[in-house]
Image: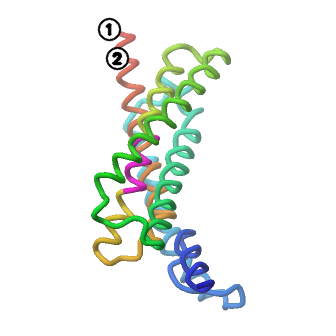
């Protein structure tokens, strides 16, 4: 039981094979590198997404990129961890997909609204301007909802296709949520900028 828990923890942390701290450097590197490379590809994808948008026109948007990325990653990993735990204890099965997604949608909406209202208040209080404050707030709401649903969906699908769902709780979900979160953030920013300019 302890070995299974250790293995699941390693998988969730992006370590692809069972390793011990006493293993040699090559073995430890081989176990960690695949997920780091996925994170690297995701980071390049994120940079590409940022390049799509004219960040010079809205330089202040760059200040909130870490917030958007961190919240998306955290929410996704939280959702995935709950699903993986539920699958391991047989409290959740793949037949529960719609019910589980509905529940996480509710959690995502509630958490997103709370965090969105908080960030709206703080950014307005700190004089970041109405447009940027609304952009960050709406984008954060959308990112949290997406991340909750994605973090739930991926481990359920992996489990359905007989792939260890613990793989989904680490770098894969975080990386995808980072890239999609940036797309959402800049799309909302473009939309709000367009509304203000028209």
Q: Residue at x 61, y 88 (%)?
A: 26
Q: Is 145 contained in the magenta span?
A: yes
Task: Tell me the SS state at disc 2.
Answer: helix
Q: Residues within 10 Å of mark 2 (few under 14, many from 20)?
A: few
Residue 48 visible, this orientation: no
- The quadrant of the rendering that contains the C terminus is top left
- The percent coordinates of residue 7 (x first, y second) are 56, 81
- The percent coordinates of residue 70 (x first, y second) are 57, 46
- The percent coordinates of residue 76 (x first, y second) are 48, 52
Label the magenta part by its dominant secondary structure.
helix
Q: Which residue is denoted by mark 2 in the rendering? A: 194
Q: Residues within 10 Å of mark 1 (few under 14, many from 20)?
A: few
Q: Residue at x 39, y 40 (%)?
A: 183
Q: Which mark is residue 198?
A: 1
Q: Is 96 contained in the magenta span?
A: no
Check if mark 2's residue and mark 1's residue have beta carbons within 8 Å. yes
Q: Count of labels shown?
A: 2
The vertical placement of 147 against 63, above or below, is below
- The quadrant of the rendering that contains the N terminus is bottom right
Q: Please identify the quarter of the rendering in which residue 66 is found.
A: top right
Task: Tell me the SS state at disc 1.
Answer: loop
Q: Which residues are magenta?
A: 144-152
Q: Report the front residue among 148 and 196.
A: 148
The vertical placement of 173 against 11, above or below, is above
Q: Residue furthest right?
A: 22
The vertical placement of 113 against 15, above or below, is above
Q: CA distance from mark 2 to mark 1?
A: 6 Å
């Amino acid at each position: 039981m302890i070995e299974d828990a250790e293995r699941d923890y390693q998988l969730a942390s992006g370590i692809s094979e069972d390793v011990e701290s006493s293993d040699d450097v090559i073995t430890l590197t081989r176990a960690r590198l695949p997920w780091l490379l996925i994170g690297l590809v995701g980071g390049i994808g994120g940079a590409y997404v940022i390049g799509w948008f004219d960040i010079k026109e809205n330089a202040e948007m760059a200040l909130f990129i870490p917030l958007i990325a961190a919240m998306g990653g955290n929410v996704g990993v939280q959702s995935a961890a709950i699903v993986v735990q539920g699958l391991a204890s047989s409290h959740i099965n793949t037949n529960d997909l719609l019910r589980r997604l509905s529940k996480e949608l509710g959690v995502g909406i509630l958490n997103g609204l709370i965090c969105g209202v908080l960030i709206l208040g703080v950014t307005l209080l700190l004089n970041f301007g109405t447009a940027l404050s609304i952009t960050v707030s709406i984008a954060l709401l959308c990112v949290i909802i997406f991340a909750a649903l994605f973090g739930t969906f991926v481990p359920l699908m992996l489990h359905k296709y007989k792939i260890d769902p613990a793989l989904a709780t680490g770098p894969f979900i975080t990386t995808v949520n980072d890239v999609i979160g940036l797309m959402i953030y800049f799309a909302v920013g473009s939309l709000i900028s367009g509304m203000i300019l028209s």
